[in-house]
Amino acid sequence: MALHERLKQAGYKPWLGKKDLIPGQNWRSVIRKAIADSQLFIACLSQRSIAKPGFVQREFKMALNQYADRPPNSIYLIPLRLDECDIPDLRQEEYGLNLRDLHWLDYWEEDGFEQLERAITHQFNPEPEEPKKPVIVTPPLSVFNFEIVGVNAKGEQIKKESKQSQYFREDLGNGITLEMVAIPEGTFTMGTEDEEIERLVKKLRWEGFRRERPQHEVTIKPFDLGKYPITQAQWKAIADRQDLKVEKDLNHNPASSKDRSDSDRRPVEKVNWYDAVEFCARLSKLTGGEYRLPSEAEWEYACRAGTTTPFYFGETITGELANYCASNTYAEQAKGEYRPDTTPVGQFPPNAFGLYDMHGNVWEWCADTFHGNYDGAPTDGSVWVQNGNDNSSPLRGGSWFDNLYYCRSACRLNYLRRDFGYYHVGFRVVCGAGRTL
């Protein structure tokens, strides 16, 4: 009765049989109709009420029937305890709903009525289940021209072709920009055929090449990818912005090659996976875009750029085409120069999408977790985290330190820890919502 009066004083229209039934009415049918017409049913529970097996409990079951027809997560039935008592085991048979499944309210608590009003307010003004995502505006695209080259197994140039791609620039401040290349949608075969893997394992005696199988077809949606690995200048532009901090502080410049005259154009390295993720989060905050690390599938698709050969140049690479340990050979080409350090980005020819340094210079972090092979891998380009090792993420592309076998489009380095910054590891960024599996 006291609760009934308090609800009336608060501006609500409570219906209570003892107060609202008119003498002479058929109370069974009237109560049933009142329950059906109500927008909210408060099941007042006490040691006394739950001990009555009659119509009081049948009312609760009627309310459960109404609750089953309401939209998911809406509030209709509130178990309200007036004293210390157990919630009765009352079930709605068809859907298996139980009064005990609902979170109850202890009315005797100091803020009991306020909590009840909160529930009532939610019933009439429900919060959205998912917040609306902000509208992301991608900067307008411009066009750039470039030339691609192709070589034979001896490393001899057999093709030279003019290409054109679209891109946009992000302003990072102080004259520093980030160029993002538009990668078109498409389908490709990811991984390496078994015969080639067995040849690699036999030649180099490294079982890790088996991680590149089974080959599988992947369909990729459009996304934007960094034209180059993130440079030291770009890193500093974001790392120094404490106002953009999301989770952690970033070293001003961790790179081992930071004392070179051209260090601003060299890739940042000695960056661990968590540093790279923080960089992406800060970049998103600065620009309003959705920046992240690429999935393995996105990376390999972007690297291949429509090719099916081990490298986007063809059957092999040379020291004139990429920065790797060129004193080692892959096919029939001559030995080349070994540069014991990173080189400025954009120094070597790009692939057919207009991406530079996808072979060599620095390994690049991907967003996925470690998986020993492609069994169960997604086929839509998603970031793959299910059943993976959270302490390790794949790296792609090879580096200045590695021979050319590890610079192939399909090569995966999977055993490095996420929390360690390696002298030959950097990253590049994706702009696009993407999905995670």
Image (cartoon, rainbow, N blue to C red):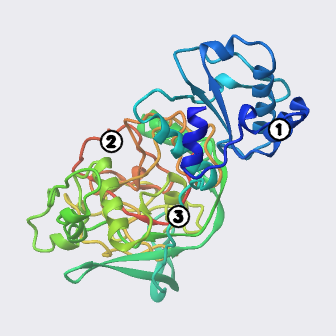
Q: Visible in this render: residue 217? A: yes
Q: Which secondary structure, mark 1?
A: loop
Q: Amino acid at mark 3?
A: Lys
Instruction: Point out residue 204 in the picture as x, y percentages from the top left corner.
Output: 41, 39
Work out which quarter of the rendered image holds the C terminus and state it.
top right
Check the image and report above or below for 125 versus 168: above
Q: Residues within 10 Å of mark 1 (few under 14, many from 20)?
A: few
Kindly report which numbered mark, 2 or 1, lies closer to the viewer in this rendering. 1
Which residue does the image show at 57% across and 30% down from the upper left? 103
- In front here: 184 or 275? 275
Q: CA distance from mark 1 to mark 3?
A: 52 Å
Which residue does the image show at 48% across and 73% down from the upper left? 351
Q: Which residue is mark 2?
A: 418
Q: CA distance from mark 2 to mark 1?
A: 72 Å
Q: CA distance from mark 2 to mark 3?
A: 29 Å
Q: Amino acid at mark 2?
A: Arg
- In front here: 185 or 43? 43
Looking at the rendered structure, which numbered label has been put on residue 133? 3
Check the image and report above or below for 303 versus 78: below
Q: Earlier in the sequence, mark 2 or mark 1?
A: 1
> CB atoms at circles 2 and 1 under 8 Å apart?
no
Which residue does the image show at 30% across and 75% down from the upper left? 347
